[in-house]
Image (cartoon, grey):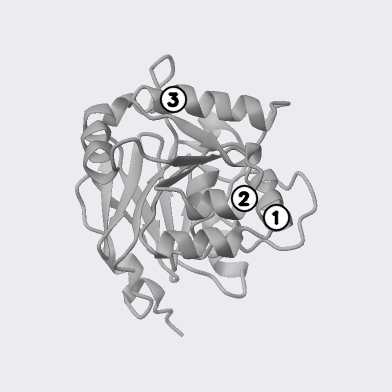
Amino acid sequence: MTNLRMLLFSNGQSERNQPYYHYCHNWLQDFLTHELPINPNILFISWAVWGGHTADQMFSYGQEHWGQFGLKLSALHQQEDYLKAIENADAIIVGGGSIHMLVNDLEKTNLMGVIKEKIRQGCLYIGTSAGSIITGPSMHTASEPPLIHIPSHKTLGILPFQINSHYYEVDSDYYHNGPTPSARIKNYLQLNPDPRPVACLRDGSFLQVHNGTITVRGVRNVTTFDLNLKKETFTPGTDLKSLLNFRGRYYKKRL
């Protein structure tokens, strides 16, 4: 865990009609300047296609969003040699969209383990929404309903806990009459045969994983659920490194 360098976003926007990552622009600009070499080789994975968009279109959006920080991206799906592209990357960015499409393509190309090892070696990893969720053991805490059949719901498993993106807490009678996000998370914790704690990211929040620590960043809170369904909410700046401790309190389930 000490080599991990990761930024895990819920979304690029905390509110509509704002540039992507506007809520952390200055912090992110300083971080990227410090963490990346001059003229970095940045690989963008745009396989989380959705809404009729193509991988090329998703890549174009990614270049637009990250270009504001002076970054030039290379699309993984446009490379002749996927393994070489990953090996040569200084950073890997995985965009948001459909997690089912993303996991399906990573499985088909047998790249899940390759990317995991690259990140463990210290390569900077940045995920947004689906790109953040796949860093956990499985995609079971994604809010997206199944779109296609995929052989396995396992994901990278770099982190020992699950991630849920676009989390919110509102009166369900005002918003809709279905289960709230917290109810869905509790269903996962109660029904899954191998549950893990869940970190729920609100739009406008993200996690920074660095040197064995996890810090809440952004302008919105992060909520966690342990195996006993206990819910806690943390403000930006809070250290959540206990989520990395598989023997810690988050993972202890009462009989």
Quarter of the image with the N terminus is: bottom left
* Residue denoted by label 2: 82
Q: Nearer the viewer, residue 51 or 63?
A: 63
Assess whether mark 2 and mark 3 are in contact (beta carbons under 8 angstroms).
Answer: no
How crowded is the residue under tag 2: few (<14 C-alpha within 10 Å), some, or many (20+)?
A: some
Q: Is residue 155 rendered to the left or right of residue 28? A: right
Assess whether mark 1 and mark 2 are in contact (beta carbons under 8 angstroms).
Answer: yes
Q: Residue at x 34, y 35 (%)?
A: 39
The residue at the far bottom in this view is 255
Q: Secondary structure at mark 2?
A: helix
Q: Residue at x 57, y 30 (%)?
A: 59
Q: Is residue 13 rendered to the left or right of residue 62? A: left
Q: Is residue 104 rendered to the left or right of residue 27? A: right
Q: Position of residue 235 (x, y in %)?
A: 24, 46
Question: Vertically, is 224 above or below 247?
Answer: above
Q: Nearer the viewer, residue 215 or 59?
A: 59
Question: Vertically, is 3 above or below 194?
Answer: above
Quadrant of residue 126 within the rendered picture: top left
In three-dimensional space, the C-alpha distance between marks 1 and 3, rounded to whole angstroms, equals: 26 Å
Q: Is residue 52 rendered to the left or right of residue 40? A: right
Question: Vertically, is 234 above or below 21?
Answer: below
Q: Residue at x 47, y 36 (%)?
A: 171
How crowded is the residue under tag 1: few (<14 C-alpha within 10 Å), some, or many (20+)?
A: few
Discs 2/1, front = 2
Q: Secondary structure at mark 1?
A: loop
Can residue 65 be seen at all in this image of the molecule? yes
Q: Position of residue 110 (x, y in %)?
A: 67, 60
Q: Position of residue 187 (x, y in %)?
A: 58, 60
* Residue denoted by label 1: 109
* Residue denoted by label 3: 65
In three-dimensional space, the C-alpha distance between marks 2 and 1, rounded to whole angstroms, equals: 9 Å
Q: Secondary structure at mark 3?
A: helix
